[in-house]
């Protein structure tokens, strides 16, 4: 299969796509509101928005849950881009909510893991409602492919500039845009278990990306191929529109 990725062309198209989205779906004053983790995705998405809209129309929101060891990375990004930003600590909100939940039902591990992501998205929409904004989704194709996101959490948003780019491609765009290396190539770590994304997944993004782009069928590692295919099937519901009942409405002629 033929595959080529032109980083310069893609970066320019991303910027134009964001410009077009805001022209068609917003007013000249509408801002892009983006959650800032200090990793590759929020860094690249924020930089693209700044290039498309100007720094005055981009607002970064830092959302630590209590103490966040790597919050300096988030601060480095907003300082580098020169964007307005807010730090809203969700720690007490998460604790209060989980405490209320425990009065009725014992939270599962999935509830514990996914609730902070959903509270962060609620926070972003609250900020957007206050400033007149659209929320940026920062998911990439690789994570979406295997469902490595939280439905109605980080998988939500109003527009998604990176969802058709693999991790490998996002890294290339980040380097091309001249973002700090420590942000673009920051190794994402699960704050709950301390493992990297790749350790949790059981395979590398490099393997996943070559499989997605048809460069490697992973026939040499059939167990990895089977795992990726299974995760993809099981998580398609996160990418599809909500199923809805369709009535067989028919007009009645008088």
Image (cartoon, rainbow, N blue to C red):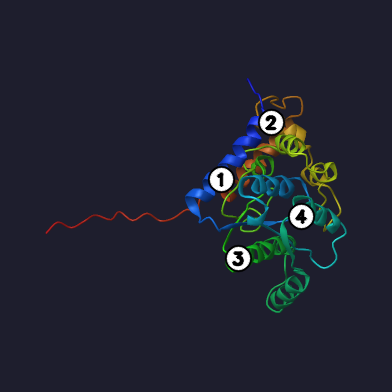
Disc 4 to disc 3, how far (Cα)?
18 Å
Residue 253: x percent and y percent? 14, 56
Foreground: disc 1 or disc 2: 1
Label placed on residue 7: 2
Residue position for label 1: 19
Disc 2 to disc 3, how far (Cα)?
33 Å
Which residue is at the front of the view, 236 or 196?
Answer: 196
Neighbour class for label 2 at 10 Å: few (<14), some, many (≥20)? some
Tag 1 and tag 3, C-beta contact below 8 Å: no
Toward the left, the furthest residue is: 254
73 left or right of 90 in image = right
106 above or below 196? Answer: below
Residue 128: x percent and y percent? 60, 63
Kind of element beneath mark 2: helix
For the point 63% across and 35% down, the residue is: 12
Residue position for label 4: 78
Tag 4 and tag 3, C-beta contact below 8 Å: no
Neighbour class for label 3 at 10 Å: few (<14), some, many (≥20)? some
For the point 57% across and 40% down, the residue is: 16
Residue position for label 3: 131
Disc 1 to disc 3, how far (Cα)?
19 Å
For the point 58% across and 67% down, the residue is: 129
Kind of element beneath mark 4: helix
156 left or right of 220 in image = left
Mark toward the start of the polypeptide (1 vs 2): 2
Mark toward the start of the polypeptide (4 vs 3): 4
For the point 75% across and 54% down, the residue is: 82
Q: Is residue 211 visible?
A: yes
Q: Is residue 33 visible?
A: no
């Amino acid at each position: 299969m033929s595959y080529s990725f032109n980083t310069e062309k893609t970066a320019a198209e991303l910027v134009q796509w964001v410009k077009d989205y805001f022209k068609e779906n917003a007013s000249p004053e509408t801002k892009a509101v983006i959650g800032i983790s200090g990793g590759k995705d929020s860094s690249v998405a924020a930089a693209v928005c700044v290039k498309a809209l100007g720094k005055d129309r981009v607002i970064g929101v830092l959302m630590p849950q209590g103490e966040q060891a790597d919050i300096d990375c988030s601060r480095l990004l907003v300082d580098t881009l020169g964007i307005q930003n807010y730090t809203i600590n969700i720690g007490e909100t998460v604790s209060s909510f989980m405490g209320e939940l425990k009065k009725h039902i014992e939270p599962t591990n999935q509830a514990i893991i996914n609730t902070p992501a959903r509270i962060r998205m609620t926070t972003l929409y609250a900020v957007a409602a206050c400033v007149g904004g659209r929320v940026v989704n920062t998911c990439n194709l690789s994570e979406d492919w295997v469902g490595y996101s939280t439905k109605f959490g980080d998988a939500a948003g109003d527009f998604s500039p990176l969802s058709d780019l693999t991790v490998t491609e996002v890294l290339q765009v980040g380097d091309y845009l001249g973002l700090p290396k420590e942000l673009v190539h920051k190794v994402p770590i699960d704050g709950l278990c301390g493992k990297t994304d790749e350790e949790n997944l059981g395979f590398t993004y490099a393997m996943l990306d070559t499989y997605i782009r048809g460069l490697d069928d992973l026939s040499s590692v059939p167990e990895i191929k089977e795992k990726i295919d299974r995760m993809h099937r099981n998580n398609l519901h996160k990418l599809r529109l909500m199923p809805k009942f369709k009535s067989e409405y028919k007009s009645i002629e008088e």
